[in-house]
Image: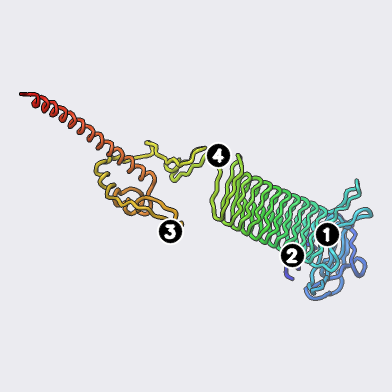
Amino acid sequence: MKDFRRVTIALVGMILGWAVVAQAQAVRGAGTTNTIPVWTSSSMIGNSSITQSGGSFNVGGNLTLTGSINDSLTLQGNLTDSNLDQSANVIGGFGGNATFPGNSVASGVVGATIAGGGGGILVGNSAYPNVVTGAWGTIGGGANNQAGGGNSVTVAGGFQNIASSTAATIGGGNQNTASGLDATIGGGGLNTASGSAATVGGGGNNTASGFSATVAGGAQNTASLEGATVAGGENNKAVGLFAMVLGGQSTSALGQYSLAAGHIATANYDGSFVWSDTTGIAFDNAPNQFIAQASGGFALYTAPNGTAGAILLAGSGSWSSQSDRNVKSNLMQVDGQALLLRLAALPIATWNYKAQPGSTRHMGPMAQDFHEAFGLGEDDRYISTVDAEGVALAAIQALYQTVTQLKQDLGNKDQQIAELRARLAHLEQRP
């Protein structure tokens, strides 16, 4: 009630300020002519007398919020609703005339505020009053807005917006509907927030129908299950539990906790991420997949300015690691023969990853053995393809050198054998 007294004092000051300008405004209230009943926090205490002196109103006693000024501001005090809540209503803006009804607060409603707006259009005889039908409801302005269906409903402005559930809020825009408990629409047009605590930030023709579902903006987007989110774009759907569409067009996140983005991307299964470019469609075919389509290629960098990383070039089926001479330092020659000895001693086996079936076989060394043999890589749990390929290339070079030397040695031996055979033949021909 302290807040109510503050509102009362503020409105009295506002009324008296208007009176200086308007001078001989008509004041109509319940009770004795030229008096307005007084309401305190607990009871009526009689009437206040109002007299006019020049351009000012003089108020004797306390002023309650009951009465109207030129049909543009109506003050309704001493109100008690069916729950025995007591408060007052303030109705500003268009007060109505013989052609169009004015802004109004429904009977039995307390604590309502209509700050302004309302009216009608003579062409077509269209009336656009603002109406509050729920206790503690508020309409800031605009036209043909409705705040009701529950308590503490707010429409800040705009046109033909309807907030129809407790604590629902519409910031503005056109023909928006916030019908869920605690639902919010920031603006835009033809948006609907029908889920409890659902939010539509703006845009057009968007729907957030799940509990805590969110559509941030865009057009014709839908978030229909708990926690589902569409960040923007057009014609996107997040219809899985806690699913999300980052944006794009005609993209869908259907699985629980799935995420989709881009153009015609569909995350069908739970936990999947699907990204699609503009050249076609992309979709997952099993839960917990990461699917990305980028016909221009992929690049993953692990250092600033692209100095370390890998790239999957357009149309390629394999990754290319950054290997530019300009990004390398501390070059050292490799002793190929010593490497061959270490490679020959390296245990090689077939095996399967524990995360895969036993029937899925792989071949290669253990990372710990590889690291111990060659001292390559960041740690002993991984084998970089760059290091494995480097060892293989160095081994090939060493083997080439060995084979070349063997060929040379064999060539020399063949020559020696040929010479020996010639000498033997010569000896055999002697008598």
Q: Residue at x 61, y 47 (%)?
A: 265
Residue at 76% x, 59% y is: 163
- Which secondary structure, mark 4? loop
Label drawn at residue 354: 3
Other-residue count near label 1 (Cα within 10 Å), few / some / many at <14 / 14–19 / ≥20: many
Numbered circle sitting on residue 131? 1
**Element marked by disc 3:** loop
Relative side of 179 to 289, left or right:
right
- Earlier sequence position, callout 1 versus callout 3: 1
Q: Is residue 402 above or below residue 109?
A: above
Disc ID at residue 166: 2
- Mark linked to residue 7: none
Give the foreground label among 2 and 3: 3
3D distance between C-alphas at marks 1 and 4: 55 Å
Q: Nearer the viewer, mark 1 or mark 4?
A: 4
Label annotation for residue 295 = 4
Q: What whole-number distance in Å separates the C-alpha atoms at marks 3 and 4?
A: 33 Å
Amino acid type at mark 3: Lys
Can residue 56 be seen here? The reply is no
Pick the residue in front: 160 or 54.
160
Residue 359, percent across and down? Answer: 44, 55
